[in-house]
Amino acid sequence: MLLNNSSGLPNLPPSLFDDWVNSNGRLHFQIDGLIAAAVRQPIVFRPGRGYDYTNTEYLILGQIPQRVTRRTLDQLYRRYVIGPLGLKHTSFQPNHVLPKPNVR
């Protein structure tokens, strides 16, 4: 249900998203705090009874492999995707700071 957007979980509160947009992306949030803020809102529909894209679902999905493996997403991407595919000029930057040179 998380992957096909049928969980019924609410999206992030609009005020959080607006704050981020107005800061030109300079605000940084803790994922657990974003998830907590989202799930404090009422559900959109009963799980499995509708479809609605929410960032909350993807934030939760990103936490699952980290909690199970006790490794960060960047470690997991390097080990299981970037390394095995031989992607020498690819990186995963969780703090959104891209190495030079980079494409905008």
Image (cartoon, grey):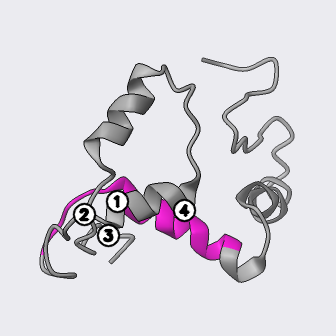
What whole-number distance in Å separates the C-alpha atoms at marks 1 and 4? Answer: 10 Å
Instruction: Please state which amino acid type lies under the numbered disc 1.
Output: Ala
Q: Quadrant of residue 41?
A: bottom left
Mark 1 nearby-residue class (10 Å; few <14, some 14–19, many ≥20): many
Inter-mark Cα distance, 2 to 3: 20 Å
Q: Please name the residue that numbered disc 3 is placed on.
A: 4
Residue 32 image label: 4
Q: In this view, does 37 lie above or below 65?
A: above
Residue 12, position as x, y percentages in the image? 33, 51
- Front label number (3 vs 4): 4
The residue that label 2 is drawn on is: 41
Residue picked out by circle 1: 38
Q: Quadrant of the C terminus?
A: top right
Labels 3 and 4: the sequence-earlier one: 3
Q: Which of 103 and 30 is in front in this view?
A: 30
Residue contact between numbered discs 1 and 2, judged by CB atoms under 8 Å:
yes
Residue numbers of the magenta segment: 50-66
Residue 52 lies within the magenta run: yes
Magenta span: predominant SS is: helix
In this picture, residue 79 sits left or right of residue 61 = right
